[in-house]
Image: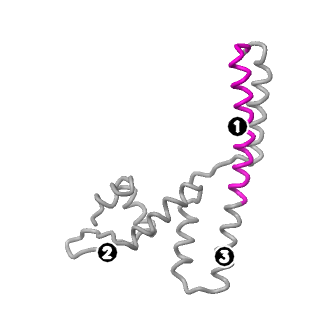
Amino acid sequence: MHIKQFAAKYNLSTDTVRYYEKEGLLHPNKQDNGYRVYDVTCEHTIKFILVLRQVGFTLQEIKQLLTLEQKPISDSCNQETVQLFSTKITHIEQQLFFYQQALQSLQLTQTLLAEGKYAENKLIIGSLIEDMYNKLQEGSGHYETT
């Protein structure tokens, strides 16, 4: 399929598809007329990219995994992959912990507001926000977008 169909199928812009290609993540076949043809391999790769992006992998990390996937299977390749996943798992666990705490704080705030007693609970609500901010600064809720 050509770029417009490929982009539409995966809910992406053609610019994003071109960017992924420029970054070496996608490798469509090029026809003599210059058109790109995205095959089953490209579809597998874009699904891989989209899933990993959704769970917080950076494009650089995805590129590293795709590069490792193309190498012959070896102990060093396996160890590098395991290390990358271990680092990401730790990061996601930290995010999950932060979001669980944030959810509890927001639920408490909602309860305090629902009772119509904002003025009486303003300090508590401010303290909850301050606490969540401090946890962000500690890195437990930091979400890298690059």
* Classed neighbour count for the residue bearing mark 2: other residues with Cα under 10 Å, few (<14), some (14–19), many (≥20): some
Q: Which residue is at 38% across, 60% downward? A: 17
* Classed neighbour count for the residue bearing mark 3: other residues with Cα under 10 Å, few (<14), some (14–19), many (≥20): some
SS assignment at label 1: helix
Amino acid type for the residue under numbered disc 2: Asn
Residue 75 screen position, x and y as percent: 67, 85
User: Where on the picture, by quarter, is residue 38?
Assistant: bottom left
Residue 48 screen position, x and y as percent: 50, 65
Residue 7 within the magenta-colored segment of the rendering: no
User: Where on the picture, by quarter, is residue 107?
Assistant: top right
Q: CA distance from mark 1 to mark 3?
A: 34 Å
Magenta stretch, main secondary structure, is helix
Residue 144 screen position, x and y as percent: 62, 52
Give the label, 1 or 3, closer to the camera.
1
Mark seen at residue 29: 2
Residue 110 within the magenta-colored segment of the rendering: yes
Q: How is the image coloured?
A: one colour
Q: Quadrant of the N terminus?
A: bottom left
Q: Which residues are magenta?
A: 90-117
- Disc 3 or 2, which lies upstream in sequence? 2
Q: CA distance from mark 3 to mark 2?
A: 29 Å
Query: In this picture, is 48 found above or below 81?
Result: above
Q: CA distance from mark 1 to mark 2?
A: 46 Å
The residue carrying mark 3 is: 80
Give the label, 1 or 2, closer to the camera.
1
Comparing 12 with 113, the one in front is 113
Q: Which residue is at 38% across, 54% downward? A: 12
